[in-house]
Amino acid sequence: MNNKVTDFEVQPDDNARTPNTGIAYNLRYLLVGMVFGIVFVKAEIVSWFRIQEMFRLQSFHMYGVIGSAVIVGVISVWIIKKFGLKAIDGTPVTFQSKKFHKGQIFGGLMFGLGWAMTGACPGPLFAQIGSGFTVVIVVLLSAIAGTWVYGYIKEKLPH
């Protein structure tokens, strides 16, 4: 029987310790999220106008941000693999190959179309709401609904 999970790029170690779920433990994630949101706002990553400029090919700003993130990600993965770094709770970080599905093309196009129309992707949603753009709550609820629908019908979709 093959129990290998192939839907995730990073998988937890079976011998990993149970994570601490106390309030004090989780406050650090809230703090990091708040700093992340502030950086998004100050860098104008949550700006609907900046996002529209990107999709209209009128500005390099967002491409520079995305390109920098890709470079940092590649270097980070290389460092994790090279030095065998562990997660904050001490569990080893492992990377698994991910199988390509043609549905990823359709999903990526849907994601990009939604991003272009709403000016929001999952990362900046909360920063936009926190900045006072409460209309983005509709986008957040739509993203949650879309995720739920996908999870509900995933087994019925061709993979």
Image (tube, rainbow, N blue to C red):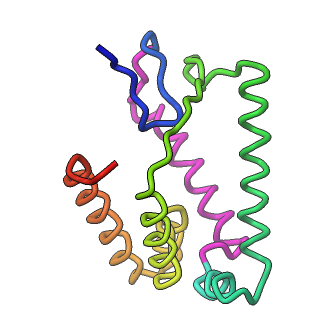
Q: Quadrant of the N terminus?
A: top left
Dividing the picture into quarters, in which one does residue 50 lie? bottom right
Residue 61 sits inside the magenta stretch: no
19 left or right of 45? left
Nearer to me, 55 or 51 = 55
146 left or right of 112? left
Residue at 48% from the left image edge and 63% from the top image edge: 105
Residue 37 sits inside the magenta stretch: yes
Please state the horizontal and vertical placement of residue 45, each as a whole percent of the image: 66, 72
Instruction: Residue lying at the far top in this picture: please name it.
Output: 15
Nearer to me, 26 or 66 = 66
Residue at 42% from the left image edge and 38% from the top image edge: 7
Q: Start and end of the magenta stretch?
A: 17-46
Nearer to me, 77 or 86 = 77
Name above or below for residue 1 compared with residue 100: above
Please state the horizontal and vertical placement of residue 39, each as a whole percent of the image: 68, 63
Please state the horizontal and vertical placement of residue 135, each as a whole percent of the image: 39, 83
158 left or right of 123? left
Name above or below for residue 96 compared with residue 74: above
Give the tally of numbered discs: 0
122 left or right of 85? left
Please state the horizontal and vertical placement of residue 79, each as a whole percent of the image: 78, 30
Q: Main secondary structure of the magenta part?
A: helix
Residue at 43% from the left image edge and 64% from the top image edge: 107
